[in-house]
Image (tube, rainbow, N blue to C red):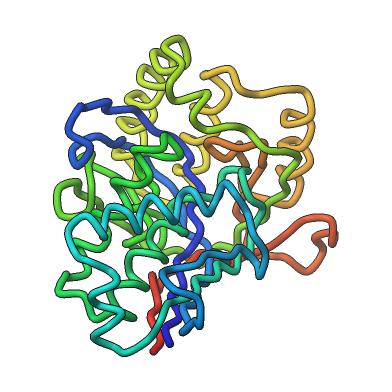
């Protein structure tokens, strides 16, 4: 019925705004969108209600995220009523995730957005694009799986978040870039364990504000990587493997850093011919979310 592609988002640096109002809660910072992300496919199902799969299988973590989005929408619009209107028993949501999960690519937010935008289209809900994005943001911050990925993923290219909050409340600006993104993931990091830790929050905010001030003086691809590296080094998440891999990446990239928050190194380059197959490559996504019916 509906296909939604949401770009993945690698955050380079950020600072946290922990407001009690979840529409205002979020982060400042900057990240880059990749043309590999999450494709959410929504089809008719003989089973009642809305059923969720990840890459064709059950996945508890992403199912919880998607289910949170569904519950938020259902609290304002009776989903069963809208299923009756289009004369189907139920829907199946399948998230096809094209990047490593839990490694700093914002797949949680992509799944939230894919769910909210997909249901808007499939059920013909009377909500606009921004409101659908707000449901995704509310899911993301409620579950502490991110703070600013949703609003960034509704933009293009390299995205600077200049006011925290949900789409329609927060504010972003962006630049297009023709660099390729090279990346390699080592393992998962639990985002919630970092952003809810007071010690890390203090360091993140100090270094995130410093990085943002440095970036706005020279808004460009090269300075984004420089500011990202200084931020990730100074907040204390580097380990010896990350440090060694950054040195490796710098041999063929203009610079590299650690994805926030994930055990992933990423860098920018324009020459990918000599890069080993052990590394993954994506384009910077300058097109944004795509919806096909």
Residue at the (79%, 31%) spot, across then down? 244
Left or right of residue 167, residue 245 in this image: right
Left or right of residue 252, residue 195 in this image: left
Point out residue 50 in the picture as x, y percentages from the top left corner: 43, 68
Along the viewing direction, whichever of 270 and 79 lies nearer the viewer: 79
Point out residue 197 in the picture as x, y percentages from the top left corner: 46, 16
How many numbered marks, from 0 up?
Answer: 0
Along the viewing direction, whichever of 259 and 131 lies nearer the viewer: 131
Left or right of residue 122, residue 111 in this image: right
The C terminus sits in image quarter? bottom left
Q: Quadrant of residue 87?
A: bottom left
Residue at the (43%, 87%) spot, across then down? 1
Point out residue 86 in the picture as x, y percentages from the top left corner: 29, 88
Q: Quadrant of residue 118?
A: bottom left
Q: Is residue 194 above or below residue 44?
A: above
Along the viewing direction, whichever of 170 and 267 lies nearer the viewer: 170
Left or right of residue 135, residue 92 in this image: right
Residue at the (30%, 30%) spot, across then down? 213
Residue at the (40%, 78%) spot, across then down? 290
Along the viewing direction, whichever of 42 and 141 lies nearer the viewer: 42
């Amino acid at each position: 019925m509906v296909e939604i592609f949401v770009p993945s988002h690698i955050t380079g640096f950020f600072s946290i705004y922990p407001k009690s109002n979840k529409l205002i809660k979020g982060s400042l910072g900057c990240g880059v969108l990749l043309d590999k992300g999450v494709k959410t496919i929504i089809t008719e199902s003989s089973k009642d209600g809305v059923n969720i799969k990840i890459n064709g299988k059950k996945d508890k973590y992403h199912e919880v995220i998607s289910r949170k989005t569904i519950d938020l929408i259902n609290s304002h619009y009776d989903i069963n009523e809208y299923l009756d209107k289009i004369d189907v028993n139920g829907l199946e949501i399948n998230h096809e995730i094209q990047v490593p999960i839990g490694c700093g690519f914002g797949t949680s937010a992509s799944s939230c957005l894919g769910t909210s935008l997909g249901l808007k289209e499939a059920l013909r809900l009377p909500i606009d694009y921004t409101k659908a994005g707000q449901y995704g943001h509310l899911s993301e911050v409620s579950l502490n799986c991110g703070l600013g990925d949703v609003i960034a993923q509704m933009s293009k290219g390299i995205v600077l978040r200049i006011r925290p909050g949900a789409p329609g409340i927060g504010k972003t600006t962006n630049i297009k870039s023709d660099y390729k993104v090279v990346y390699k993931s080592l393992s998962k990091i639990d985002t919630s364990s970092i952003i809810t830790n007071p010690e890390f929050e203090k360091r993140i905010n100090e270094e995130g504000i410093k990085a943002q001030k440095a970036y706005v003086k020279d808004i460009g691809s090269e300075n984004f990587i420089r500011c990202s590296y200084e931020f990730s080094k100074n907040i204390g998440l580097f380990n010896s493997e990350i440090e060694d891999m950054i040195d490796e990446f710098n041999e063929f990239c203009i610079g590299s850093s650690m994805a926030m928050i994930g055990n992933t190194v990423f860098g920018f380059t324009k020459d990918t011919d000599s890069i080993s197959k052990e590394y993954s490559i994506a384009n910077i996504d300058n097109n944004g979310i795509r919806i096909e019916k």
